[in-house]
Image: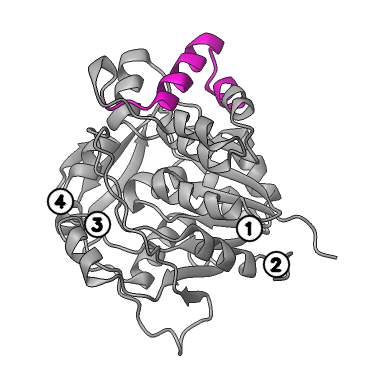
Protein backbone atom coordinates (compact mmCIF):
# COMPACT_ATOMS: atom_id res chain seq x y z
CA UNK A 1 0.00 0.00 0.00
CA UNK A 2 1.37 3.40 -1.01
CA UNK A 3 2.24 5.73 1.87
CA UNK A 4 2.41 9.50 2.08
CA UNK A 5 5.70 10.50 0.44
CA UNK A 6 8.11 12.94 2.06
CA UNK A 7 9.19 15.47 -0.56
CA UNK A 8 11.89 18.06 0.05
CA UNK A 9 12.19 21.01 -2.36
CA UNK A 10 15.49 22.89 -2.41
CA UNK A 11 15.92 26.35 -3.90
CA UNK A 12 14.38 29.76 -3.44
CA UNK A 13 12.39 32.48 -5.11
CA UNK A 14 9.74 32.03 -7.77
CA UNK A 15 10.87 28.55 -8.83
CA UNK A 16 10.33 26.97 -5.42
CA UNK A 17 7.05 28.84 -5.00
CA UNK A 18 5.89 27.32 -8.29
CA UNK A 19 6.77 23.70 -7.52
CA UNK A 20 5.32 23.90 -3.99
CA UNK A 21 2.08 25.41 -5.32
CA UNK A 22 1.60 22.33 -7.51
CA UNK A 23 2.72 19.69 -5.01
CA UNK A 24 0.45 21.09 -2.29
CA UNK A 25 -2.54 19.63 -4.14
CA UNK A 26 -1.27 16.08 -3.59
CA UNK A 27 -1.18 13.95 -0.46
CA UNK A 28 2.46 14.58 0.36
CA UNK A 29 4.53 15.61 3.38
CA UNK A 30 6.25 18.73 2.01
CA UNK A 31 9.35 20.59 3.17
CA UNK A 32 11.07 23.53 1.50
CA UNK A 33 14.76 24.20 2.16
CA UNK A 34 15.45 27.81 1.29
CA UNK A 35 18.58 29.83 0.53
CA UNK A 36 19.64 32.50 3.02
CA UNK A 37 22.08 34.30 0.70
CA UNK A 38 19.51 36.80 -0.61
CA UNK A 39 20.68 40.38 -0.10
CA UNK A 40 18.72 42.16 -2.85
CA UNK A 41 15.36 43.87 -3.03
CA UNK A 42 13.12 44.22 0.00
CA UNK A 43 14.90 41.36 1.80
CA UNK A 44 18.27 43.00 1.34
CA UNK A 45 17.13 46.34 2.72
CA UNK A 46 15.50 44.75 5.78
CA UNK A 47 18.58 42.60 6.27
CA UNK A 48 20.96 45.58 6.15
CA UNK A 49 18.83 48.02 8.16
CA UNK A 50 17.43 45.66 10.82
CA UNK A 51 20.04 42.91 10.96
CA UNK A 52 17.47 40.19 10.24
CA UNK A 53 17.82 37.14 8.01
CA UNK A 54 16.37 37.61 4.50
CA UNK A 55 12.61 36.87 4.66
CA UNK A 56 11.61 37.04 0.98
CA UNK A 57 12.17 33.47 -0.22
CA UNK A 58 10.77 32.05 3.02
CA UNK A 59 7.68 34.24 2.66
CA UNK A 60 7.05 32.96 -0.87
CA UNK A 61 7.27 29.34 0.30
CA UNK A 62 4.93 29.99 3.23
CA UNK A 63 2.37 31.52 0.86
CA UNK A 64 2.73 28.61 -1.57
CA UNK A 65 2.03 26.10 1.20
CA UNK A 66 -0.71 28.14 2.89
CA UNK A 67 -4.20 26.69 3.12
CA UNK A 68 -5.67 29.95 4.40
CA UNK A 69 -8.15 31.95 2.34
CA UNK A 70 -6.98 34.01 -0.61
CA UNK A 71 -7.26 37.33 1.23
CA UNK A 72 -4.66 36.42 3.86
CA UNK A 73 -2.29 35.02 1.22
CA UNK A 74 -2.70 38.20 -0.82
CA UNK A 75 -2.01 40.25 2.32
CA UNK A 76 1.35 38.52 2.90
CA UNK A 77 2.20 39.08 -0.76
CA UNK A 78 0.96 42.69 -0.84
CA UNK A 79 3.66 45.09 -1.98
CA UNK A 80 3.55 48.78 -1.12
CA UNK A 81 3.58 51.06 -4.16
CA UNK A 82 4.00 54.36 -2.34
CA UNK A 83 5.50 55.93 0.75
CA UNK A 84 8.34 54.87 3.03
CA UNK A 85 7.57 51.16 2.47
CA UNK A 86 7.82 51.47 -1.33
CA UNK A 87 8.77 48.11 -2.84
CA UNK A 88 8.46 46.18 0.42
CA UNK A 89 5.95 43.36 0.82
CA UNK A 90 3.80 43.20 3.94
CA UNK A 91 4.94 39.62 4.52
CA UNK A 92 8.61 40.61 4.56
CA UNK A 93 7.94 43.36 7.11
CA UNK A 94 5.85 40.95 9.20
CA UNK A 95 8.63 38.34 9.18
CA UNK A 96 11.29 40.91 10.08
CA UNK A 97 9.16 42.28 12.95
CA UNK A 98 8.46 38.76 14.21
CA UNK A 99 12.16 37.88 14.18
CA UNK A 100 13.01 41.03 16.13
CA UNK A 101 10.19 40.31 18.60
CA UNK A 102 11.05 36.65 19.21
CA UNK A 103 14.81 36.93 18.72
CA UNK A 104 14.71 33.93 16.37
CA UNK A 105 14.10 33.56 12.65
CA UNK A 106 13.04 29.95 13.28
CA UNK A 107 10.34 31.15 15.70
CA UNK A 108 9.26 33.85 13.24
CA UNK A 109 8.69 31.18 10.58
CA UNK A 110 6.84 28.99 13.07
CA UNK A 111 4.45 31.82 14.02
CA UNK A 112 3.90 32.90 10.40
CA UNK A 113 3.20 29.27 9.44
CA UNK A 114 0.43 29.14 12.05
CA UNK A 115 -1.09 32.40 10.84
CA UNK A 116 -1.09 31.14 7.25
CA UNK A 117 -2.16 27.57 8.13
CA UNK A 118 0.79 26.11 6.24
CA UNK A 119 0.73 22.54 4.93
CA UNK A 120 4.32 21.43 5.37
CA UNK A 121 7.51 23.03 6.66
CA UNK A 122 9.70 25.88 5.46
CA UNK A 123 13.33 25.54 6.55
CA UNK A 124 16.18 28.07 6.12
CA UNK A 125 19.18 26.11 4.85
CA UNK A 126 21.29 27.91 7.48
CA UNK A 127 20.59 30.34 10.31
CA UNK A 128 23.97 32.05 9.81
CA UNK A 129 24.21 35.47 8.20
CA UNK A 130 26.13 34.92 4.98
CA UNK A 131 27.01 36.65 1.72
CA UNK A 132 27.41 34.88 -1.61
CA UNK A 133 30.73 35.50 -3.38
CA UNK A 134 31.62 34.66 -6.99
CA UNK A 135 35.29 34.51 -7.91
CA UNK A 136 35.74 34.72 -11.69
CA UNK A 137 38.56 33.20 -13.76
CA UNK A 138 39.90 36.75 -14.26
CA UNK A 139 40.44 37.00 -10.50
CA UNK A 140 37.62 39.50 -10.04
CA UNK A 141 35.33 38.87 -7.08
CA UNK A 142 31.66 39.81 -7.04
CA UNK A 143 30.31 40.03 -3.51
CA UNK A 144 26.62 39.68 -2.74
CA UNK A 145 23.75 37.78 -4.36
CA UNK A 146 22.28 41.08 -5.59
CA UNK A 147 25.48 42.05 -7.42
CA UNK A 148 25.98 38.54 -8.80
CA UNK A 149 22.41 38.49 -10.15
CA UNK A 150 22.89 41.86 -11.86
CA UNK A 151 26.32 40.99 -13.30
CA UNK A 152 26.63 40.08 -16.97
CA UNK A 153 30.19 38.78 -16.58
CA UNK A 154 29.53 35.25 -15.36
CA UNK A 155 29.13 33.54 -18.73
CA UNK A 156 31.98 35.49 -20.39
CA UNK A 157 34.66 35.19 -17.72
CA UNK A 158 33.19 32.08 -16.07
CA UNK A 159 33.03 31.34 -12.37
CA UNK A 160 36.15 29.83 -10.85
CA UNK A 161 34.56 29.47 -7.42
CA UNK A 162 31.29 30.25 -5.65
CA UNK A 163 31.38 30.38 -1.88
CA UNK A 164 29.63 31.76 1.19
CA UNK A 165 31.31 34.31 3.41
CA UNK A 166 31.60 33.42 6.23
CA UNK A 167 31.26 29.64 5.99
CA UNK A 168 27.80 28.49 7.03
CA UNK A 169 26.73 25.70 9.33
CA UNK A 170 23.65 23.78 8.17
CA UNK A 171 20.29 24.11 9.85
CA UNK A 172 19.85 20.69 11.49
CA UNK A 173 16.17 20.74 10.50
CA UNK A 174 17.35 20.78 6.87
CA UNK A 175 19.71 17.84 7.44
CA UNK A 176 16.91 15.87 9.08
CA UNK A 177 14.44 16.60 6.26
CA UNK A 178 16.96 15.51 3.63
CA UNK A 179 17.79 12.32 5.52
CA UNK A 180 14.11 11.33 5.81
CA UNK A 181 13.05 12.34 2.29
CA UNK A 182 11.63 10.02 -0.36
CA UNK A 183 12.17 12.67 -3.04
CA UNK A 184 14.56 15.63 -3.14
CA UNK A 185 13.52 18.12 -5.84
CA UNK A 186 16.13 20.77 -6.64
CA UNK A 187 14.97 23.84 -8.56
CA UNK A 188 13.78 25.31 -10.80
CA UNK A 189 15.30 28.69 -10.06
CA UNK A 190 18.17 31.03 -10.76
CA UNK A 191 21.19 28.73 -10.92
CA UNK A 192 23.76 30.90 -9.16
CA UNK A 193 21.59 32.87 -6.73
CA UNK A 194 18.70 30.57 -5.76
CA UNK A 195 19.91 26.97 -6.10
CA UNK A 196 23.68 26.68 -5.68
CA UNK A 197 23.85 28.82 -2.48
CA UNK A 198 22.00 25.96 -0.73
CA UNK A 199 24.67 23.53 -1.91
CA UNK A 200 27.46 25.73 -0.52
CA UNK A 201 26.32 25.27 3.07
CA UNK A 202 28.63 22.76 4.75
CA UNK A 203 27.01 19.36 5.17
CA UNK A 204 24.13 19.89 2.74
CA UNK A 205 25.70 18.24 -0.37
CA UNK A 206 26.92 15.35 1.79
CA UNK A 207 23.45 14.86 3.28
CA UNK A 208 21.90 14.83 -0.20
CA UNK A 209 24.44 12.29 -1.45
CA UNK A 210 23.85 10.00 1.54
CA UNK A 211 20.07 10.28 1.43
CA UNK A 212 18.18 7.31 0.01
CA UNK A 213 15.75 9.72 -1.66
CA UNK A 214 15.22 9.96 -5.40
CA UNK A 215 17.11 13.11 -6.38
CA UNK A 216 15.53 15.22 -9.12
CA UNK A 217 16.80 18.42 -10.70
CA UNK A 218 14.15 20.53 -12.43
CA UNK A 219 15.94 22.35 -15.22
CA UNK A 220 15.10 25.96 -15.98
CA UNK A 221 12.96 26.93 -18.95
CA UNK A 222 15.15 29.85 -19.92
CA UNK A 223 18.79 30.88 -19.75
CA UNK A 224 19.81 34.10 -18.00
CA UNK A 225 21.73 36.72 -19.95
CA UNK A 226 25.30 36.99 -18.69
CA UNK A 227 24.95 33.91 -16.49
CA UNK A 228 23.92 30.78 -18.39
CA UNK A 229 23.99 31.88 -22.03
CA UNK A 230 23.93 28.92 -24.41
CA UNK A 231 23.62 26.24 -21.73
CA UNK A 232 21.44 23.27 -22.67
CA UNK A 233 19.63 20.86 -20.34
CA UNK A 234 22.63 18.60 -19.82
CA UNK A 235 24.88 21.60 -19.16
CA UNK A 236 22.59 22.78 -16.37
CA UNK A 237 22.58 19.29 -14.82
CA UNK A 238 26.39 19.11 -14.98
CA UNK A 239 26.68 22.38 -13.06
CA UNK A 240 24.43 21.01 -10.31
CA UNK A 241 26.46 17.78 -10.11
CA UNK A 242 29.65 19.81 -9.89
CA UNK A 243 28.47 20.79 -6.41
CA UNK A 244 26.62 17.60 -5.50
CA UNK A 245 28.95 15.02 -7.00
CA UNK A 246 28.89 13.01 -10.23
CA UNK A 247 25.84 10.85 -10.91
CA UNK A 248 24.05 11.95 -7.75
CA UNK A 249 20.96 12.99 -9.70
CA UNK A 250 18.50 10.22 -10.52
CA UNK A 251 16.37 12.35 -12.84
CA UNK A 252 16.51 15.67 -14.65
CA UNK A 253 13.17 17.09 -15.74
CA UNK A 254 13.07 19.49 -18.67
CA UNK A 255 10.53 21.30 -20.77
CA UNK A 256 9.98 20.11 -24.35
CA UNK A 257 7.54 22.78 -25.52
CA UNK A 258 9.02 25.93 -26.98
CA UNK A 259 7.40 29.10 -25.67
CA UNK A 260 5.28 31.11 -28.14
CA UNK A 261 7.20 33.70 -30.16
CA UNK A 262 5.44 36.51 -28.27
CA UNK A 263 6.77 35.13 -24.97
CA UNK A 264 10.32 34.85 -26.30
CA UNK A 265 10.22 38.37 -27.75
CA UNK A 266 9.13 39.81 -24.41
CA UNK A 267 11.85 37.85 -22.61
CA UNK A 268 14.63 38.48 -25.16
CA UNK A 269 16.54 41.01 -23.05
CA UNK A 270 16.70 38.60 -20.11
CA UNK A 271 17.68 35.33 -21.80
CA UNK A 272 16.74 32.59 -24.26
CA UNK A 273 15.00 29.23 -24.41
CA UNK A 274 16.93 26.30 -22.89
CA UNK A 275 17.48 23.96 -25.80
CA UNK A 276 16.84 20.27 -25.13
CA UNK A 277 19.02 17.81 -27.03
CA UNK A 278 18.14 14.29 -28.12
CA UNK A 279 18.42 11.98 -25.10
CA UNK A 280 17.23 8.78 -26.85
CA UNK A 281 20.63 7.13 -26.79
CA UNK A 282 21.59 8.39 -23.34
CA UNK A 283 20.71 7.34 -19.83
CA UNK A 284 17.04 7.48 -18.88
CA UNK A 285 17.48 10.08 -16.19
CA UNK A 286 16.46 12.92 -18.54
CA UNK A 287 12.66 13.18 -18.47
CA UNK A 288 11.03 15.65 -20.84
CA UNK A 289 7.47 16.96 -20.90
CA UNK A 290 5.42 20.05 -21.72
CA UNK A 291 6.05 21.94 -18.47
CA UNK A 292 5.61 25.56 -19.48
CA UNK A 293 2.79 27.75 -18.23
CA UNK A 294 0.47 29.21 -20.85
CA UNK A 295 0.35 32.37 -18.76
CA UNK A 296 2.91 35.13 -19.22
CA UNK A 297 3.54 36.88 -15.93
CA UNK A 298 3.68 40.65 -15.61
CA UNK A 299 6.03 42.56 -13.34
CA UNK A 300 4.30 44.00 -10.27
CA UNK A 301 4.64 47.77 -10.70
CA UNK A 302 5.15 48.14 -6.95
CA UNK A 303 8.11 45.71 -7.10
CA UNK A 304 10.66 48.41 -7.80
CA UNK A 305 13.70 46.47 -6.57
CA UNK A 306 13.92 43.34 -8.73
CA UNK A 307 13.14 42.06 -12.22
CA UNK A 308 11.03 38.91 -11.85
CA UNK A 309 10.85 35.88 -14.12
CA UNK A 310 8.16 36.33 -16.76
CA UNK A 311 8.11 32.81 -18.24
CA UNK A 312 7.50 30.10 -15.66
CA UNK A 313 6.78 26.41 -15.17
CA UNK A 314 3.16 25.39 -14.90
CA UNK A 315 2.88 24.27 -11.24
CA UNK A 316 0.35 21.52 -11.98
CA UNK A 317 2.30 20.04 -14.90
CA UNK A 318 5.57 20.00 -12.97
CA UNK A 319 3.99 18.56 -9.81
CA UNK A 320 2.29 15.79 -11.77
CA UNK A 321 5.61 14.76 -13.33
CA UNK A 322 7.40 14.82 -9.97
CA UNK A 323 4.74 12.64 -8.39
CA UNK A 324 5.12 10.13 -11.23
CA UNK A 325 8.84 9.92 -10.41
CA UNK A 326 8.17 9.44 -6.70
CA UNK A 327 9.00 5.84 -5.71
CA UNK A 328 6.23 5.48 -3.12
CA UNK A 329 3.37 6.87 -5.22
CA UNK A 330 1.35 5.21 -7.93
CA UNK A 331 -0.47 7.58 -10.33
Circle 2: element type: loop
Position of 248 relative to 164 (above/below): below
Q: Name the residue beneath numbered marker 4.
A: 153
From what the image shows, is residue 317 above or below residue 29?
A: below
The foreground one among 172 and 324 is 324
Location of residue 105 in the rendering, given as x and y in whole percent from the top left corner? 52, 22
Model colouring: one colour
Q: Earlier in the sequence, mark 1 or mark 3?
A: 1
Answer whether residue 186 is magenta in the image: no
> Nearer the observer, disc 4 or disc 1?
1
Residue at screen point 53% across, 50% down? 21
Q: CA distance from mark 4 to mark 2?
A: 41 Å
Residue where numbered disc 3 is placed: 224
Q: Position of residue 67 (x, y in %)?
A: 62, 39
Task: State which region is magenta.
Answer: 87-110
The residue to which callout 2 is attached is: 327
Question: Residue at label 1?
Answer: 183
Q: Nearer the viewer, residue 163 or 17?
A: 17
Tell me whether the residue at label 1 lies in contact with that at label 2, contact meaning CB atoms closer than 8 angstroms.
yes
- N-term mark: 1 or 2: 1
Amino acid sequence: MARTPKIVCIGGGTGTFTVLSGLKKYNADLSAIVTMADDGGSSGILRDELGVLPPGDVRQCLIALSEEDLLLRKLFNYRFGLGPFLGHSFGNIFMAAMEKSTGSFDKAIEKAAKVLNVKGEVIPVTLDKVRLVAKLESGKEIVGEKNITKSHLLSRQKIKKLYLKPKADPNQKAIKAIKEADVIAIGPGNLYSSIIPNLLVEGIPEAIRKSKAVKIYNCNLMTKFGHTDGLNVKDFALVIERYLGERVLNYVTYNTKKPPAAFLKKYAKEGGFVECQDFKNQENKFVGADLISDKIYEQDKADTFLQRTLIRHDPDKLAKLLMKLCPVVKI
